[in-house]
Image (tube, helix red, strand yellow):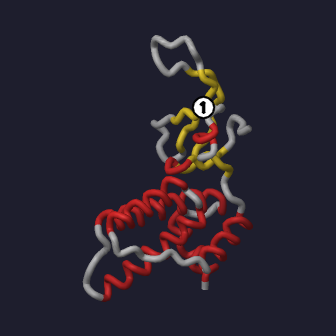
Amino acid sequence: MFKEEEIVVYGRTGLCKISSIEDKAFSITSRLKTRCYVLKPLGDVSSTVFVPVDNERLVSNMRYTLSKKEIDSLILAASKTELEWNEDRRQRFEDFREILSQGITARLIAMIRCLAEKKKELLTQGKKLCLSDEGAFNEAKQMINEEFSYSLDILPDEVEAYVVARIE
């Protein structure tokens, strides 16, 4: 069980602080209260996320931040993992959306590599990624940058250089 004041990663929301664990009624008329983790996203202090403690599916989206050793290991593993480019734009959108919603770091890194390689290829042809691919690319990079910069105690702008230095 997670504890108050801990920093966790919650799905697409990213880094959150568990501000409290409390009983919450989700409707005005309901007398039933549900025990919830109250998460405050570090990137959006005006937001609050409530995760029912007994909802295994939602709690499974919460995890502790990675250590430096885990990050280095993931980078190395991801550098050897290939994600195939799917020419079907709709299917590719669904695949990327699933990777983003799962928030599995190794898959996010593989997706970023795939999109970066495609972006580079398209630039040589004077083209760009389509809007949905660019959006997925930016969201995945933001998710990785946020956690890695926190865990490694570096600036978000330094994350890419850190990753590249470990791949080469």
Q: Indicate left or right for 121 with 80 as reference.
A: left
- Helix, strand or loop for disc 1: strand
Q: Look at the picture and state if 4 lies above or below 116.
A: above
Quarter assignment of residue 163: bottom right
Instruction: Please provide percent x and percent y for residue 96.
Output: 44, 63
Instruction: Please provide percent x and percent y for residue 117.
Output: 43, 81
Quarter assignment of residue 55: top right
Q: Look at the picture and state if 134 lies above or below 21.
A: below
Q: Look at the picture and state if 24 lies above or below 135.
A: above
Q: Nearer the viewer, residue 118 or 168?
A: 118
Task: Write down the residue under mark 1.
Answer: 52
Tally of numbered discs: 1
Q: As drawn, which residue projects farthest toward the left?
A: 126
Q: Indicate left or right for 118 with 8 as reference.
A: left
Q: Indicate left or right for 46 with 7 as reference.
A: left
Can see residue 149? no
Instruction: Please provide percent x and percent y for residue 102.
Output: 54, 54
Q: Nearer the viewer, residue 73 or 60?
A: 60
- Residue at image position (44%, 63%) is 95
Q: Check disc 1: other Cα within 10 Å, few if <14, some if 14-19, many if 20+.
A: some
- Residue at image position (58%, 34%) is 51
- Residue at image position (74%, 38%) is 1
Image quadrant occupied by the C terminus: bottom right
- Residue at image position (39%, 67%) is 92
Q: Nearer the viewer, residue 135 or 32?
A: 32
Dot 1 amino acid type: Pro
